[in-house]
Image (spheres, helix red, strand yellow):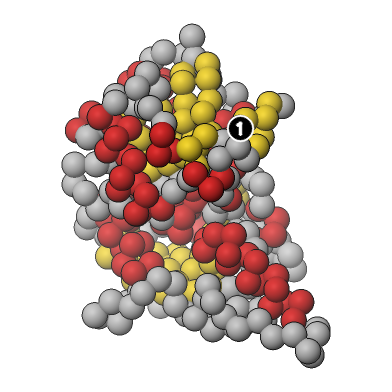
């Protein structure tokens, strides 16, 4: 017997990816319900070789359903997640609403799968921010070996992190560059994103950080180790899909770059592509559609006693969102619900 699974936000980028990945990974499903707001009622979405008709989330009864994957944003989640949880359906939420609640587990399965068991506190599990997810997958095996003291990360985040509107804005502005009569002013982003980079993701906070940068700090501590100090600079770049990160790490113990390379090669969810030659690294366009977190450019940092630098790339719609949610569902099913 399989699980009765709900995908809420099934018409959005992440919701569609959730359906794709559930089918690709052959998650043991007995029935799938695709939900969205009333304006999407009747829209069709794909699930493997099947076509699902989207249902109205407001009228949906979660009773008897086992797992709900949410990709509907914080405001809608605030309404519907408690409703699903009260009906006995475990919610795996992709929004930021519950990430910082100490009673709710924040999970990246390659890093802290055991935390899934804490779903019983509130019947909710939180999915981390996309930029955090790929970073901690790379950091975890290195932390286990040499204990990380400090991380300085600069992110280069694709427009798909801002949803369909962000992707459309990049596309429309790019076309407008070649059409002198067209003008596409910024709406989703603070400034023109085409042929530009923007050092702001989310709103500014009192200390000068943006909320996206704050998320990376707080989430890394909750998922990996509260003792790690993190400094982040998050930048939006004119890339459709795939987040990149330049990560500098300071350890308690010395870790040779060759040993680090071998550790990462054996780490779950990581693929090392690191040749010291032109093109011997992975870029965002090459990671699209892949499950892995790719690591390249591993090298010693001579400016600190025990330092390494590396380059990390991942498909943010997959590992940063939909894949991680499905992996959480897999852990939940195999360790806790045990139905499939």
Identify the residue at image location x=28%, y=59%: 218
Specify whether residue 136 is in view: no
Residue 340 image point, x, y percent: 47, 14
Residue 11 image point, x, y percent: 58, 45
* Residue 52 picture quarter: top right
Q: Is residue 91 above or below residue 151?
A: above
Instruction: Please tell me which residue lies in front, 201 or 222.
Output: 201
Instruction: Please tell me which residue lies in front, 55 or 291.
Output: 55
- Residue bearing mark 1: 53
Residue 232 in the figure: left or right of residue 52:
left
Identify the residue at image location x=38%, y=43%: 93
Q: Is residue 129 above or below residue 1?
A: below
Q: Secondary structure at mark 1?
A: strand
Instruction: Please tell me which residue lies in front, 209 or 192.
Output: 192
Residue 56 in the figure: left or right of residue 85:
right
The image shows a total of numbered marks equal to 1
Specify few, some or many for label 1: CA neighbours under 10 Å numbering under 14, 14-19, or 20 or more: some
Residue 162 image point, x, y percent: 52, 63
Specify whether residue 180 is in view: yes
Residue at the extreme bottom of the image, as rendered: 180
* Residue 109 picture quarter: top left
Identify the residue at image location x=74%, y=68%: 278
Residue 208 image point, x, y percent: 30, 82
């Amino acid at each position: 017997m399989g699980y009765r699974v709900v995908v809420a936000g099934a018409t959005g980028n992440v919701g569609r990816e959730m359906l794709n990945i559930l089918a690709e990974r052959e998650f043991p499903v007995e029935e799938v319900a695709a939900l969205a707001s009333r304006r999407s009622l009747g829209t069709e979405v794909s699930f493997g070789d099947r076509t699902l008709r989207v249902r109205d989330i407001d009228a949906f009864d979660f009773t008897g359903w086992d797992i709900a994957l949410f990709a509907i944003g914080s405001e809608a989640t605030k309404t519907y997640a408690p409703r699903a949880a009260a009906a006995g359906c475990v919610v795996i939420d992709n929004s930021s609403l519950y990430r910082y609640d100490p009673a709710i587990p924040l999970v990246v399965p390659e890093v802290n799968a055991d935390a899934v068991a804490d779903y019983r506190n509130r019947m909710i599990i939180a999915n981390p921010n996309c930029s955090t997810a790929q970073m901690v997958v790379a950091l975890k095996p290195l932390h286990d070996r040499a204990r990380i003291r400090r991380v300085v990360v600069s992110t280069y985040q694709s427009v798909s992190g801002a949803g369909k509107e962000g992707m459309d804005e990049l596309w429309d502005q790019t076309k407008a560059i070649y059409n002198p009569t067209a003008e596409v002013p910024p709406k989703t982003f603070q400034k023109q994103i085409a042929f530009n980079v923007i050092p702001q993701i989310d709103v500014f906070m009192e200390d000068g950080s943006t909320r996206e940068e704050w998320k990376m700090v707080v989430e890394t501590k909750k998922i990996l180790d509260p003792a790690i100090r993190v400094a982040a600079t998050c930048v939006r770049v004119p890339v459709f899909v795939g987040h990149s990160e330049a990560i500098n790490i300071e350890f308690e113990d010395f870790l040779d770059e060759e040993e680090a390379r071998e550790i990462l090669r054996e780490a779950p969810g990581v693929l090392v592509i690191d040749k010291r030659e032109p093109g011997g690294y992975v870029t965002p366009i090459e990671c699209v559609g892949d499950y892995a977190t790719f690591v390249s450019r591993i090298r010693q940092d001579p400016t600190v006693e025990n330092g390494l630098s590396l380059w990390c790339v991942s498909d943010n719609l997959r590992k940063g969102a939909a894949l991680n949610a499905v992996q959480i569902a897999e852990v939940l099913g195999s360790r806790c619900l045990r139905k499939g």
